[in-house]
Image: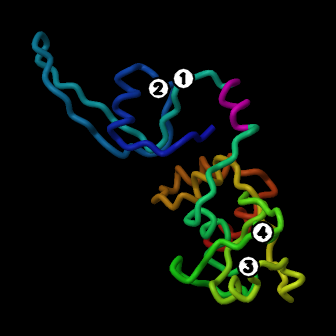
Amino acid sequence: MPLEWIDFKEAVRVYHLGQVAYTCGVPLYLIRGGHNAITGRRSILEISSIVATHGDSHAVLKARAHYVPPLNNQTLFARDAHLCMYCGEQFSSRGLSRDHIKPLSVGGTDTWNNVVTACKRCNNHKAGRSPERAGLELLAVPFMPTHAEYIYLQGKRILADQMEFLLAHFPRHSPLHKRLSKLA
């Protein structure tokens, strides 16, 4: 189960603590340590692109069943491919805003399933109304990303083997599959 991005320093720490269950993917770093005073041998640690650690998998699975990724504009815009979900045009982050389908002023919530990416023009036109009352139509149904999808949406540079690993953890019905197959 993919849990999080870690840097090479954190990877060295989990190797040192003996928490690595297995590795896969390509080697990314070759870390050279000091020389052993007795043998004179230098320690060398090869860090792979995917590092699996020991842990209570049942606790992880339970936590994932109820996991709600934090909602922020960066990942929301990535989820919606930087498209306005009303006019369909693509914008940079500066030209986008978070729109609440059911406005907060009438009891809507600030949750993944009630927000979409909207250009500022469409969001201003919609104002505090529902899309129907504003004469707008949603182009896609909003969804809450799973943990693996959220890791992808965070926008880190992802290597091919890491992407393959993440894709294996996306739900079969994920809207992101269609988008990613277009990029391939």
| Residue 35, quarter of picture | top left
Q: Tell me how far mark 3 sits from mark 2, CA to CA.
A: 42 Å
Whole-percent x, y for residue 128 in the image: 77, 78
Looking at the image, which residue sits at the far right? Answer: 132
Q: Tag 2's secondary structure? A: strand
Amino acid type indicated by mark 4 = Ser
Mark 4 and 1 residues: CB-CB less than 8 Å, in contact?
no
Residue that badge 3 annotates: 85
Q: Earlier in the sequence, mark 1 or mark 3?
A: 1
* Left-right relation of 100 to 55: right
Residue that badge 4 annotates: 105
State whether the magenta stretch is mostly helix, strand or loop.
helix
Q: Which mark, by number, is residue 54?
A: 1
Q: Earlier in the sequence, mark 3 or mark 2?
A: 2
Q: Residues within 10 Å of mark 3 (few under 14, many from 20)?
A: many
* Left-right relation of 37 to 96: left
Query: 13 and 69: which one is in front?
Result: 69
